[in-house]
Image (cartoon, coloured by chain):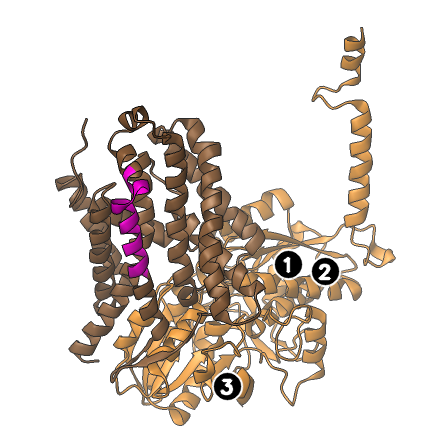
Chain colours: A orange, B brown
């Protein structure tokens, strides 16, 4: 008899009624606890606009992913405080792509079919963007990337992919080549990662330095998963005047340390992309040799003497101090040079959605067309890195670049800032002619 | 760079590679030789060694040398304990069945890797070398610590060699490897030998990792490359042959170092894997292995 009663009290999945009640209560509590309390009341009831953030939480791009997520979360918080988009709150849904193109594609599928996001956004590493983009096109899912490579502007992707938040590598290197050739030297050896992003550096910097009357003596390609670099340095020709380095992946600190061991004090001029030391403290032992060398920076890691009010507010919102480290943990160095693109891209999505009067996924076409109607972005809290112009045919923004010199203790000081015109190139790519 | 110094640098790099490879592959070879278990999780024990070394050195704020010395003791010990437990809890229950243990060690690989990701995080973290000096050759500079790694590995290998060939413990291990049942008849606790050998194999990988981590940084995905190279070495040297493993590690380490300096690291990997294919086709017992007594 008692057994029978028990059975009656038990649901088909074997959970007793009492247990179910407890679970329900717990669930309700959990839902309440996780609801975004900071939404202003006026639109608390309206459906949120969902932005799917495809980020490198794990894999070789994880340090970027961590900071991209923080930056995106801070931007969404500010957008919601300002009233959201078209009066609706913004919800950020983060999925990890593992810095892997295959998983990147799966993430986009998940965004489209499971989360039903309005826009996909985020990721950095060029192979993930290039791998994911065709699927974004097939799913007709707007995909706003914060990558940096030339792949969007090159025309190899599709109409759904935009890169409005950061200048592409081709433009970056064209704008800086004149300064490098007139201040550091004309005979250059390049060390770069052996995949799409590095190949952009190889192709466009070689051409840009040749246009300045210089030449590239040697091209040294290194796999991005490499852990030991000493073996590559003997290939640097002795008459190299400028060593140009750009490296990514978990081995970057080892790369720069081994470069110091190889050269000691007898080094050529060194110009690097800060990618080689992004998320790494420049005051790390064995990096002293970098003093007097130069780095490209998108957004200067150290607050400069002429820091704008916007940079100050942006730093505070993301939680970064004046030396580019996390306010909560000074050992946690940000990817400050790149992550502004996450912040700025979200404000650009907001601008385009408001322009298109975006209400639901049915307005996707209007959103794409609104993105393609944008021309420029003024410097401000939405664009703390500086003003930019946007080329709708290329789906690509063009902004200012910084060249910084390493001082004592690894402090970076900006010595040159390029103009937007320095980085403009001719192109006959036109995404706006592609069918939607 | 001229040919002479170029070759010199290539040899130095090859020696460092060979030294670490000797230690890693020795662990893998011991486990296979004695237990007939193909340990796919070996690379993760290596990774754990590096991660634990990071933890030990970051807890101790004092001199990096003391932290490093402690790491060299604690990391292999802890990794050994983890390996001992996984042997007791998993491999023993499968009766050391060759196919089942391969699948089981793949499982252990993922458990260890993901646990490291969850606790240690996805970032690469540097460990300070116990001392740092730069050796200035006329043509290039070189990390003094790397030379110390070669010396330390040589000492450790000599020690391992002594234990295996000259002590009672080594004798018991070799007896178990030669014939499990006869060893058992002579009163050897074979299960205990297996557990200890599995722990010791993992500890060797951990020692190699502690030595290399000041050069490379600890990262949760760092176990892949050493696993591949260790397998290459063990297959070429002859599965279970300690002498073969050491010679093959020297051969592969040096050739990998030299080829990757002169040509490209990708070519070096291609050459090593081609060599494995050739050995498997023409001399499946390995260059120094014996045909199995079946």
Are discs 1 and 3 both within one chain?
A: yes
Relative vertical location of residue B48 with respect to residue A288 in this rendering, above or below: above
**Which numbered dot is residue B16?**
none
Give the residue at the far right of this rendering.
A41
Q: Secondary structure at mark 2?
A: loop
- Residue at x 59%, y 51% (from the top left corner): A95
The residue pinned by badge 3 equals A406
- Pointer 2 chain: A
- Name the quadrant containing residue B182: top left
| Left or right for B257, reference A226 | left
Q: Is residue A211 magenta?
A: no
- Residue at x 46%, y 50% (from the top left corner): B77
The residue pinned by badge 1 equals A366
Are discs 2 and 1 both within one chain?
A: yes
The residue pinned by badge 2 equals A357
Q: Which of the marked residues, 2 or 1, is nearer the chain's N terminus?
A: 2
Q: Could you classify mark 2 by the number of other residues whose Cα lies within 10 Å: few (under 14), some (14-19), or many (20 or more)?
A: some
- Pointer 3 chain: A
Question: Which image quadrant: the C terminus of chain A?
Answer: bottom right
Q: Could you classify mark 1 by the number of other residues whose Cα lies within 10 Å: few (under 14), some (14-19), or many (20 or more)?
A: some
Q: Are marks 1 and 3 in contact (CB under 8 Å)?
A: no
Question: Which image quadrant: the N terminus of chain A?
Answer: top right
Counting from the top left corner in percent of width and height, residue B27 is at 34, 47
The range drawn in magenta is B153-171
Q: Are marks 2 and 1 in contact (CB under 8 Å)?
A: yes
Q: Are marks 3 and 2 in contact (CB under 8 Å)?
A: no
Q: Is residue B159 magenta?
A: yes
């Amino acid at each position: 008899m008692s057994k029978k009663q028990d059975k009656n009290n038990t649901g088909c999945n074997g959970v007793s009624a009492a247990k179910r009640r407890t679970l329900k209560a717990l669930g309700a509590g959990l839902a309440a606890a996780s609801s975004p309390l900071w939404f202003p009341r006026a639109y608390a009831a309206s459906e949120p606009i969902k932005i799917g953030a495809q980020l490198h939480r794990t894999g070789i791009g994880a340090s970027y992913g961590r900071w991209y997520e923080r930056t995106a979360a801070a931007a969404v918080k500010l957008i919601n405080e300002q009233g959201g988009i078209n009066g609706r709150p913004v919800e950020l849904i983060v999925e990890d792509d593992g810095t892997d193109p295959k998983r990147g594609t799966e993430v986009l599928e998940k965004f489209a079919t499971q989360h039903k996001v309005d826009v996909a956004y985020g990721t950095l590493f060029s192979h993930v963007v290039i791998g994911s983009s065709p699927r974004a096109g097939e799913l007709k899912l707007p995909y706003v990337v914060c990558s940096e490579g030339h792949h969007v502007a090159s025309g190899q992707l599709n109409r759904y992919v935009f890169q409005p938040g950061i200048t592409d590598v081709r433009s970056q290197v064209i704008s800086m080549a004149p300064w490098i050739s007139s201040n550091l030297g004309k005979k250059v050896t390049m060390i770069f990662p052996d995949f799409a992003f590095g190949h952009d550096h190889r192709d466009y910097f070689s051409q840009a330095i040749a246009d300045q009357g210089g030449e590239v003596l040697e091209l040294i390609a290194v796999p991005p998963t490499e852990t030991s670099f000493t073996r590559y340095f003997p290939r640097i020709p002795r008459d190299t005047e400028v060593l140009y380095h750009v490296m990514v992946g978990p081995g970057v600190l080892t790369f720069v340390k081994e470069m110091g061991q190889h050269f000691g004090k007898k080094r050529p001029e060194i110009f690097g992309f800060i990618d080689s030391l992004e998320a790494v403290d420049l005051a790390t032992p064995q990096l002293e040799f970098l003093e007097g060398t130069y780095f490209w920076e998108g957004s200067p890691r150290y607050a400069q003497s002429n820091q704008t009010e916007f940079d100050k507010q942006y730093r505070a919102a993301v939680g970064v101090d004046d030396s580019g480290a996390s306010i909560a943990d000074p050992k946690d160095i940000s990817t400050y040079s790149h992550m502004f693109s996450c912040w700025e891209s979200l404000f650009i999505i907001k601008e385009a959605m408001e322009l298109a009067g975006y209400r639901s996924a049915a307005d996707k076409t209007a959103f794409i067309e609104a993105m393609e109607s944008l021309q420029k972005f003024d410097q401000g809290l939405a664009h703390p890195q500086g003003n930019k112009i946007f080329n709708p045919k290329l789906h690509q923004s063009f902004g200012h670049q910084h060249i910084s010199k390493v001082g004592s203790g690894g402090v970076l000081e900006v010595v040159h800032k390029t103009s937007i015109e320095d980085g403009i190139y001719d192109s006959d790519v036109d995404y706006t002619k592609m069918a939607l | 760079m001229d040919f002479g110094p170029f070759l010199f640098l290539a040899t130095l790099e090859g020696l460092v590679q060979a030294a670490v490879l000797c230690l890693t592959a020795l662990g893998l070879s011991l486990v296979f030789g004695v237990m007939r278990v193909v340990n796919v999780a070996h690379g993760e024990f290596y990774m754990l060694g590096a991660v634990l070394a990071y933890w030990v050195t970051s807890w101790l704020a004092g001199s990096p040398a003391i932290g490093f010395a402690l790491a060299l003791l604690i990391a292999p010990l802890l990794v050994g304990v983890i390996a001992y437990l996984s042997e007791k809890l998993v491999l023993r229950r499968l009766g050391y069945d060759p196919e089942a243990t391969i699948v089981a060690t793949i499982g252990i690989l993922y458990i260890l890797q993901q646990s490291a990701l969850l606790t240690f995080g996805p970032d690469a973290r540097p460990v300070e070398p116990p001392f740092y000096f730069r050796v200035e050759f006329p043509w290039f500079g070189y990390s003094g610590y790397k030379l110390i790694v070669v010396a330390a590995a040589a000492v450790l290998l000599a020690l391992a060699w002594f234990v295996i060939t000259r002590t009672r413990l080594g004798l018991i291990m070799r007896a178990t490897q030669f014939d499990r049942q006869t060893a058992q008849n002579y009163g050897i606790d074979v299960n205990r030998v297996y557990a200890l050998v599995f722990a010791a194999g993992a500890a060797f990988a951990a020692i190699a990792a502690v030595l290399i981590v000041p050069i490379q940084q600890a990262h949760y995905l760092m176990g892949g490359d050493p696993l591949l190279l260790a397998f290459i070495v063990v297959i070429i040297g002859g599965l279970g042959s300690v002498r073969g493993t050491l010679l093959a590690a020297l051969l592969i380490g040096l050739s990998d170092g030299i080829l990757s300096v002169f040509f490209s690291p990708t070519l070096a990997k291609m050459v090593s894997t081609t060599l494995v294919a050739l050995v498997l086709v023409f001399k499946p017992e390995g260059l120094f292995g014996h045909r199995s007594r079946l």
